[in-house]
Image (cartoon, rainbow, N blue to C red):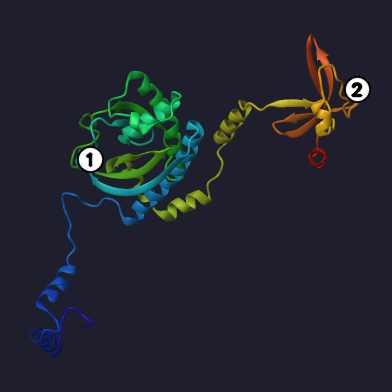
Amino acid sequence: MAGDILSQSEIDKLLSAISTGVVSADEVRVEEQKKIKVYDFKRPDKFSKDQIRTLFMLHENFARILNTYLSTHLRVLVKVEVVSVDQLTYEEFIRSLPNPSVISILSLSSLKGNIIFEMDTNVVFSIIDRLFGGMGDESKMKARTLTDIEETVIKNMMSKMMEGLQEAWHNVQDFKLNIESMESNPQFTQIVPSGDMVVIITLQLKVGSVEGLINICIPYIVIEPIVPKLTTTFWVSASSTRKEHPEEVDQLKKKLRKAIIPVSVELGRVSLTISEFLTLGMGDTLRLNTKADDELVCIVGERPKFYCRPGIIGKRSAVQITKVIESDDEEGEKRDG
């Protein structure tokens, strides 16, 4: 049947198939029902499939950033992955949250309104326990509201986590996230009317053996001005054409200047057999392979970077840099080692 209008011969064949039992009336009815698409006017779809896919990709990037930060900071195996991106009413989202919860209400510098960042209490208390020197054992945790000290600790960590979320959104929109308040009762977090549509990004977080969910609630009205940018084409092109900003370079330089790197000076080397080493005692003298007027090697981190001469400044031992070790010299030092 090429079109919606049947010819008389097609009608006769269909009636014949139904009468002979080849095709049942229920099958015909099902075919008709498939053409009908259910649409709820109380819950209109605000985001297209492409926009939902872009939000998924954005927060996959955030999950990778969060994974790196938490693994380094907590010194434990952490796994973060995006589970789903859904759109529903704000009332449905609030009803889905347990009480108590750990809910942060965030403001965006370049957009109007607030978003919600909610974390599972099991994961939050596991993080707090590890930060306080514990093992983050799930069996010792009970759902309760945070104390003032615990809330301060989580706020400090949340600030770092929000930097990762800002970075993930950078190619679409630059904004700064600020924590306005933290709540434990979902009913006290009325950031938009109950019937307003929101998009919920759900991430699964595993800290050691403890698992939980992170929910990011973004009202449509908040990101409505930038919805046209939420396309995979725009996001990919923005990522590929992204240029360095002078302020980012300055910030990176400032962080590098604050980096603490161990510096050591190698006075010389000596080779010993195991038997000679085992016979060493107090007062024994070892002859190094360097002379008093030889230049010494200054090691920065784990790499030889400078030649220097030993000396004294006041009552302290010191060295004077005489030459920068070039790449060839550096490789030679590694081979000698």
Dot 1: element = helix
Residue 6: mark: none
| Quadrant where the image shows the C terminus | top right
Residue, far left: 19
Q: Earlier in the sequence, mark 1 or mark 2?
A: 1
Res. 262 in view: yes
Judged left or right of residue 117, residue 89 is left
Q: Which residue is mark 1?
A: 96
Point out the frontmost of discs 1 and 2.
Answer: 2
Residue lying at 17% horizontally and 73% vertically, measured from the top left? 31
Residue 241 spot, x, y in % from top left? 53, 50
Residue lying at 49% horizontally and 31% vertically, measured from the top left? 73
Residue 93 spot, x, y in % from top left? 23, 41
Q: Mark 1: which amino acid?
A: Ser
Which of the pair 7/202 is nearer the observer? 202
Residue 119: which quarter of the image?
top left
Q: Which residue is mark 2?
A: 292
Judged left or right of residue 222, residue 267 is right
- In this rendering, the answer to whether 277 lies above or below 41 is above
Residue 312 spot, x, y in % from top left? 82, 14
